[in-house]
Image: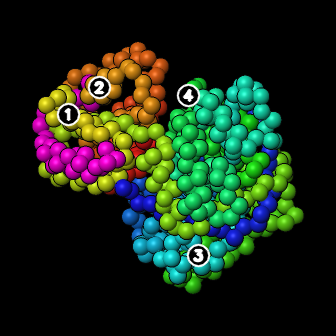
Amino acid sequence: MSLRTSPRTSPRTALRTSPRTTPRRSPRALPRLLAGLALALTLTATAGACSTVDNSVGGTGEQFDKTDTRPAEPGTLRVLASSELADMALVLEDARRATGVTVRATYAGTLDAVEQIASGRAEKEYDAVWLSSNDYLRLRPDTSARITNETPVMTSPVALGIRPAALARLGWDPGKVTWSQLHRAVAAGELTYGMTDPKRSNSGFSALVSVASGLSGAQSALRDEDVRKATPKLREFFTGQKLTSGSSGWLATAYGRRTDVDALVNYESVLLSTPGELTVIRPADGVVTADYPLTLLTAAPAAAKDSAQRLTTYLRTPEAQRRITATTLRRPVVAGVDPSPRLDRGLRRELPFPGSRSVADGLLDAYDNTLRRPSRTVYVLDTSGSMGGERLDRLKAALTELTADFRDREEVTLMPFGSAVKTGEVRTYTVDPEDPGKARDAIRADAGKLTASGGTAIYSSVTEAYRSLGASPRDTFTSVVLMTDGENTDGAGAPDFDTFFRGLPAEQQRTPVFPILFGDSDRTELAHIADLTGGKLFDATKGSLNGAFEEIRGYQ
């Protein structure tokens, strides 16, 4: 299975200032927040790998390859950061003007960042890490000597954002809702929700821990027996998860398209920034809170350590803390600074994290292979003549590596195409929990047999993928992954596919396509497919094809 690294116990106070209920109002009431989000979006253009940006004047929006290893210039701090921190762009520009420190941030998923730190790769490219939580790091003994000087900058608890109509239907008082109450509503089929993938997003893992802690009744660090006790209820709770995602941003966009999903589980700050009207609920029986510690890497040079000291000193000034809470809707960590008026000051107990890495790994493994709905994916793979040679070798290598990540109960279809779908080579596999290696070995073997020939029938092949999935809905996370190295040359055109897609039943239109930009493929063409179907474009021209396939896993 895929890499499983996870959070661990954090010595936090038992009570936190945490809001109870705040209706989500019109975005027009938030001009400053939206200005920051707009800049953040410019900084985080769609990519199939990590993206690196700097906050310097003239550098806003500059994006570097993930393999960028340039030495830091004087006054530049190279930071490996959680992707949601892109909304700190305006604050970091203020910091640059005040301190002379330019933050060159590379945004990555928290688990990926932890693995980079543990392996020693991070210290070769970065000076500091800035994750939503260091709980992941503290569970890994191999990271303790690599980090130093953790400085919390702001906080945000995990919460539930629910549509007002669903809240009214359930008849809840938002200030009194508990995790057990949420579980009962889901088990009764009265509540559906979306959340990010726990293996690829700290908000997803924090949500998983929140639910496990809340439903187990644990009063201290989660143990294996607590997870076992809560497993039946957890299995029921995750029947209500109808959306998954590798990022909070895409989750919010997908939620806006899905009228059949009642709520989102994410950080309070993300929920309050989500377009549309949501009522944000902090469960009364406790929350898990991110504290966003800016953390130096031990190997950082002296100049970088000085820059980090100046930056953190500034970020904890009352002026910067007020700016942070106003623009990001996170909570200040400095006494005497009031949180944004949109944040209620009601107290909430801090729920316990797993007490060991084995507990965290077990919880993640249970989520992937037992608790969540299984995945069902059609991989529409360009094996046209232009894919011959090195490109086809890269595709085979990427698929071979990907097989280890397929979950128990997952259905995988390989659909190679050229001038049309190569029907004689289409294969479907299901990963049997009793013998998962059988399906994975078969996928690797068939991937190795792919050959390049013919033209490029993109739209006809994606159409065939939808047809193969059928009109009858299944209780799965269903998606289509499209990999092509060229423009459409054969079969149906874009207008034909648009007409076909809009004629599908509403349930089928909820199946997104995740195209991968590769070789000489047309960005506009692929972006249109992603936008039409509610998917997301991944860019393998700036990173590896392996990385693009792996990143998509968070959305399946």
- The amino acid pointed to by label 3 is Leu
Q: Residue tagged by mark 4?
A: 258
* Secondary element at image label 3: strand
How far apart marks 3 and 1 lie (CA) works out to 49 Å
Residue nearest the viewer, comparing 525 with 225: 225
- The amino acid pointed to by label 4 is Arg
Q: Residues within 10 Å of mark 4 (few under 14, many from 20)?
A: few
Q: Residue tagged by mark 2?
A: 468
Q: Residues within 10 Å of mark 3 (few under 14, many from 20)?
A: many
* Secondary element at image label 1: loop
Q: Is residue 536 visible?
A: no
Q: Is residue 423 above or below residue 342?
A: above
Task: Look at the numbered discs 1 and 2 and tell me whether their residues touch, using CB distance below 8 Å.
Answer: yes
**The residue stretch that appears in magenta:** 431-460
Task: Look at the numbered discs 3 and 1 and tell me whether their residues touch, using CB distance below 8 Å.
Answer: no
How far apart marks 2 and 4 lie (CA) works out to 23 Å
Q: Determine which of the numbered discs, if any, sits on residue 296 in the image.
A: 3
- The amino acid pointed to by label 1 is Val
Q: Position of residue 434 (x, y in %)?
A: 31, 48
Question: Which tag, 3 or 1, sits closer to the chain's start?
Answer: 3
Q: Residue tagged by mark 1?
A: 426
